Each structure stands twice: as structure tokens, then as C-alpha cells.
Image (cartoon, rainbow, N blue to C red):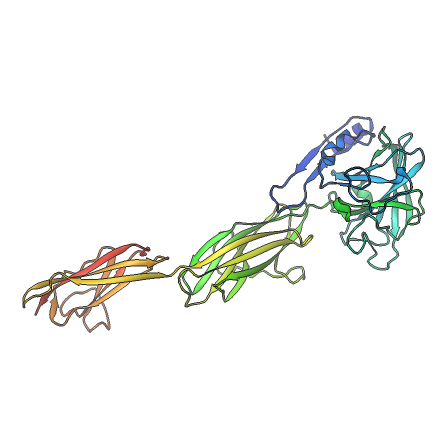
Amino acid sequence: MEWADKDDLVRRGVRFALVVAIVVASARVTRAQVLTTITLDGNMADWAPILSDPNQKSIDGPAPGAGVDRDAPVGSTGRDLTGFAWTWDSTYLYFYVSRAASDSNRQRFWYYLDTNEDNRMATGEYVVGVSWQGSNRSTDIELYRYNAVAAGAGDSLGDANGFADGYDMPGSVTSLGIVESGTFGAANGVEMESRIAWSRLGVAAGTPVRFHVAASNGTNIPMSVQDNMGGPGGLVGTTRIVGVRLDPDRAITTISPGQAIAAHVATNLGSNTDTINFSWTVSGALVPTSVVLRADTNGNGVLDAGEPLLTDTDGDGRVDTGALAKNANFSILAVATIPGAQPDGRSCTLTITASSSKKPSITDPATDTITIATPSVTLVKSVDRATAKPGDVLTYSITYTGGGSASALAVTVTDPVPAQVAYVAGSASGAGTTITYSHDGGTTYDASDAAPVTNIKWVRTSPLAPGGSGTASFRAAVR
């Protein structure tokens, strides 16, 4: 069914409920969001999923459990705000408001809408005004333009501490007329719903909006304003979900010197495009020479030629992902350069923190533990008899054993043939090794064991793990 058909049915009283729940698990996100189509009829049943979410509904005292009302006391219970909530669909931004008690007089409620998220109301930005008479539930939804006191950027949506509650917006408004009228108040006289089309605000559906809510006894604002509120906690409200994730934590062992590389994936869990910033700290006895972040352009977790350093794309002094669409991922590589001469087991913790540029307090860390793993090899040489006479054949054996905390690569054992003996051709052996021979005292080596053989070299063809071992041997005749 097309949206136009649905709107026609709504106007004729048919109720629709398109509910989309976006719930992000884990403490990495501070907000949840419920998007639902609201039928304006004064029946608040379709607000139930929104009102059950403390992150999307804000409350204002002095109702029991509602916390502090920074405007208290409010002169009229009909203008004493107790709650506000919001939701949206592809056509409308919807508002819910509750007050302390019903009032037979017509009262006014104001929704200051900051659609560019600069936390200010500039001259010309929109204010939705709702005129509500609780006794007969009649409601007029009106649209206004804001007239700022402060030139340029405009007036702040909150006080110096970010509170909308207790703060009167200083500007006046200019009416653009009634947008919609109807019976949008609840039968109890204390709840009311309203809406404004995204098209009337001149922005795309779902555009994040910061808001300030007020109640007054007339249109002469700010003089007639009596109560204010915002989002949860009384702060300036927002319809934006902000969330970031940086996965996973890594444990890396490295043979110094070299590079320790940790692959991570940053995800924008928010409801709109965001830029994810990165910062990092290092703690521990191991101090990398440098730490840089690179884009893992093919997502393979390996540093490939040409993969670029991250840059600061938004000018806030921190490298970042660039603009990242909602639910999009960005792969990065943390590259730590490890200096030489580090003892086995020395380590450090590299903590990379991802943060939202829209709300820097929303962060998620990834922790990489980098540990120096140094191999060692122990050699023990033996001969099969203690005494011998000319012509006797001796067997020389060299046992090598891996130690330390890392595998040794290309283990090489080199042994001179004693001057008192002559190497027996074809007798050198060593499982898993490549054997070569020197005929000039160890200066050069080749594959021939023709006499004279002065030195023998065994090169292991596989890594030697800690605790692993092997044996190299040869036979020689006493001269």
C-alpha cells in the first residue's frame, strides 16, 4: 500500500501502527529508539512502546518520582509539564506531552527544533506551537519561525550547563499559521499528541533534531513562558542515537624489533551518519617507538602495501574514519613499531578508543596486549667414546633444544670437523635440516661432502618451538 493510501485511511479513522524497534545491546550505546506511526486521535495507546523507554521519554517534576523541576513552582497546573516523548516515521515527526492537571482554558506548548544540531536556535529556524484546550480536547498545531536575540548562530537551546529545564528561550516567534487542527488531546485532559511533517521543516525524514520544550499562557514568548523541559535529565533533547563499537581485543606476541599489528573493526551503531574518532594510550614496560593507525582497505587484517594512514577529516585534531553511514563498518590496523634489545616477556597494553564526533562522551575501547616473545636455543655436543686410536671412527652428535617463549626460525647449527679426524663421506645426518659443507675453514659452503670437509652446517627447515629439539650428527675417522 502506498503512503498516500495509508494517510487517507488515517484521516478516516483507521489506525496504523508501523513499529520499528532499534535496540543496540551492550553499554557501548546510551540510547534506544522506537519509531512508530502515530494516529492523531487523542488515544495514547500507540505511544505505549515509546513511553516505556526511559531514553526516549523525558519527565519533569513535581509528579512523584519525576525528579527535580527547575522551573518549580509553576503558576498553573495546566501549564506544568510532566512528560515529553517523540517518535517519527517517513512523513511526520510526532510529539507527546503531559501536564500536571487538566485545564479548561486554552494553553500553549512549544517545541523548539534545531535541525542542524548546532545546539542553537537561529533566526528563521522552526518552532512548532500547539494550542490545547483540555476541557474539549481540541488542538491547533501551528508553525512559527524563531527570532533570535543573539545575532548570527542564534540562541542556545539550554543554559551554560546544558539544561533546557529551567531555561527560557530568549527569542520571540513569528506565526506561519495553523498547520492542522483536531481532537488530539486525551480524554483525561493531561495528555496530548501532535505532529509536524518533515517537509514543513525542510529536512529529510529522520534528520536528527535537538529540541527544547516549553509551556506558556499565550503567544507573547518568552514573557508568557512558565515551564521548560528537554530530554532525559532535563538536558537539551535529541532524536539522534549515538553509538560506536570497536572490536576485538587482541593479544599479540612479537619478536623484537619489528611491527606488532592489531586489526580492528569500527562500527557506527547510531541512527545517522557519524564520524568515528580514534585516540590511543600505551602503558607498561614495553614502549613502542611509534603507534600509527592505518586503513585496512581490503579488510584482510594484514598490512598491505599502500594502505594509508588515517587522517583528521573533520578538523577536530583526531584521526578518524571519515563520514560513516549508520550501521557501517570501517577496518583499521594499529601498527606499533617495537624497538630492539627487549627482554623476553616484556609487554605493554595499547588501548585504542573510538568515539563519536556527534557525542564525544560515547566511546568504546579495544585493548591490545603486546608481549615480547624471544626464542633461545641450547646446544649440547657429545662424542660416542672418550678415547680412540688411529683408524677408529667416532660419532659426533649435537642436540639442540628450543627455549624462550617464541619459536626460533631457521635454526642453524655449524660445527668444525676436529683437525685430528677426517670426515667420513655421507655420514652427516639431521632430520628436518638442510646440510651443506665447507672445504675452506667455514668461509663458503656447498652441497658436496668430498674431502676435505672442514666444517658442516645444518639449517632447520621448520620453526623450532619452545621445548622442541633435534639432533645433528656426523662420523669421522681418527688420523
Query: Does the image show residue 118?
Result: yes
Compared across the picture, whether 105 is left or right of 319 comes to: right
Relative to 440, say whether 160 is above or below: above
Compared across the picture, whether 201 is left or right of 320 comes to: right
Relative to 265, say whether 395 is above or below: below
Q: Residue at x 41, y 60 (%)?
A: 345
Residue 351 coordinates in the image, percent (x, y): 55, 57
Query: Does the image show residue 303?
Result: no
Q: Residue furthest front?
A: 64
Q: Quadrant of the C terminus?
A: bottom left
Relative to 265, say whether 445 is above or below: below
| Number of marks | 0
Residue 116 coordinates in the image, percent (x, y): 77, 52
Compared across the picture, whether 301 is left or right of 318 comes to: left
Residue 457 coordinates in the image, percent (x, y): 23, 65
Q: Residue at x 48, y 56 (%)?
A: 369
Residue 217 coordinates in the image, percent (x, y): 93, 42
Relative to 81, say whether 404 is above or below: below
